[in-house]
Amino acid sequence: MNLILLFDRDFEDDTHVVLTGRRLDHITTVHRAQVDDTLRVGKLSGKMGEGRVTAIDAGSCRMEVALDKDPPAPLPLTLLIALPRPKALRRIVETAAAMGIKRVYIMESWRVEKSFWNSPFLSEEKLAGRCMLGLEQACDTAMPVLHFRRRFRPFVEDEVPGLIKGSRAFVAHPVAVAPCPRAVGGPVTLAVGPEGGFIPFEVELLEKHGFEAVNFGPRILRTEAFVPAAVGRLF
């Protein structure tokens, strides 16, 4: 981890924390920290800074922290993604968190396997854990917000027009004629389909409500590879 995330429960007072468990293991085995060493830290949903180790043993690490820096600016991207395989979703939300995507809508579509919605991997706790891994990797403290939408048409008709307001909206569609533009230079909403892509009705409905259907080239990628590739192209 490039950033040690701190939580409210870690604080003894405004400037002193006690860390145990996974973070302690990382501090001792990866950083090999000793007393007076400084490490990069950040409070979840708060500021970042440095923590100076004041005591460390097999059971805990105590730090004096100074949090005086803002986290990096969020990526101006709203991601609408048809529910992929749950194990893949874990990797996608971790990547999204690392890249600074703060608003993710996970939605139903015709080709989504219905049993995916019952997976334990979709629990709030498990997905939050993966988001935190992404924040630790990228040195960020602002958690993405994940929204789940089980009904495609009502979501697109009732919510999407408000979601895309002020942004340029694209639906990734392999057979679209128009290529996706590069370096858009402003807020973007991107809709990504499931394995096999959106069906024509879904693409048409998205287009009707403000999306441009675009292709990203001749190669069809898995969703977990496509998301970072699309971010690199759009921004």
Image (tube, rainbow, N blue to C red):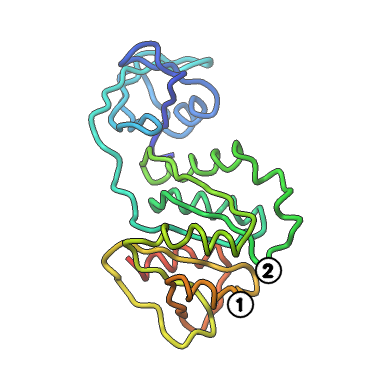
How many marks the image carries: the answer is 2
Specify few, some or many for label 2: CA neighbours under 10 Å numbering under 14, 14-19, or 20 or more. Answer: some
Q: Is residue 71 left or right of residue 228?
A: left
Instruction: Note whether 232 is above or below 60 in the view shown.
Output: below
The percent coordinates of residue 177 (x first, y second) are: 46, 88
Q: Residue lying farthest front?
A: 158
Residue type highlighted by circle 2: Trp
Question: Which disc is residue 110 wearing?
Answer: 2
Relative image position of residue 42 (x, y in whole percent): 35, 31
- Disc marking residue 1: none
Q: Residue furthest bottom?
A: 177
Could you tell me which residue is drawn at 36 percent across and 18 percent down?
A: 63
- In front here: 223 or 21? 223
Is there a contact, CB below 8 Å, between mark 2 and mark 1? yes
Which of the pair 137/170 is nearer the observer? 170
Which numbered circle lies on residue 201? 1
* Depth order, front residue of 158/192: 158
Q: Earlier in the sequence, mark 2 or mark 1?
A: 2
Residue located 42% across and 57% down the image = 163
Q: Residue furthest right?
A: 115
Secondary structure under tag 1 reads: helix
Q: Quadrant of the C terminus?
A: bottom left
Looking at the picture, how far across and down is residue 75, in whole percent? 34, 54
Q: Residues within 10 Å of mark 1 (few under 14, many from 20)?
A: few
Q: Amino acid at mark 1?
A: Phe
**Residue shown at the point (47%, 18%) measured from the top left:** 9
